[in-house]
Image: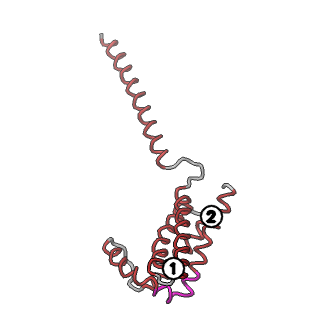
Amino acid sequence: MAVSRLLARPMLSSMFFVGAANALKNTDAMAAKAAPLTARLVPLARKAGAPLPDDPATLVRVNAGVQVAAALALATGRAPRTSAAVLLASLVPTTLAGHPFWQEEDPATRQQQKLSFFKNISMAGGLMIAAGDTEGRPGVAWRARRAAKDARREGRHLARAARREAKLARAQLT
């Protein structure tokens, strides 16, 4: 593993440990902030087949648990692409519920929420990069293109061999 990955993954994960600990310590306050968003998203998720609880406090705790597990996996390099994608998915509702700067009246509070919102947006960008990082190995798309190219080449080779065999067989019959 490159030194940059060795250092960057725990650094990227650190915010999620701190945020999850804060959410677990202040579940009621976080649930109050999350309630308007969960009221809209839970019915949509249930229609899609996701069995989510109605209680915002339970959702805050579940989100915190998911963030701790995924952050630990990312920090230690265990399934880093998957854990980065999970963190990215959990960051979206956290950001929307936790930093709605557009609803703030006080300019100072609005500015602070705006900074936090865009900090989370930048974290999302880092997580997108981490989710797509193949550590220098070919990705799935490259391997699929390579397999198709190899299959075409093998098909041409087999077709030439079959024509050659057919030609030899005709020569032996005449």
Image spot of residue 40 (x, y percent) = 35, 79
Which residue does the numbered mark 2 point to in the structure image? 9
Image disc number at residue 18: none
Q: Label 2: state its secondary structure.
A: helix
- Side (left or right) of 41 relative to 23: left
Residue 137, image x, y percentages: 57, 48
Image point 49% across, 45% down: which residue? 142
Q: Which residue in the structure is indicated by mark 1?
A: 110
- What residue appears at the point 33 percent right and 71 percent down from the top-left corner? 48
Q: Amino acid at mark 2?
A: Arg
User: Which residue range is magenta in the image?
Assistant: 21-32
Who is closer to the viewer here, 96 or 48?
Answer: 96
The quadrant in which residue 166 appears is top left
Relative to 114, 50 lies left or right: left
* Vertical order, 154 against 110 (above or below): above
Our reading of the magenta stretch's main secondary structure is helix
Residue 4 in picture, x, y percent from top left:
67, 57
Name the quarter where the C terminus is drawn.
top left
Which residue lies most toward the top here? 174
Q: Is residue 168 above or below residue 97?
A: above
Which of 35/74 is in front?
35
| Residue projecting furthest to the right | 3
Going by the numbered disc 1, the residue's amino acid type is Arg
Q: Earlier in the sequence, mark 2 or mark 1?
A: 2
Residue 71 versus residue 133 in the image, above or below: below
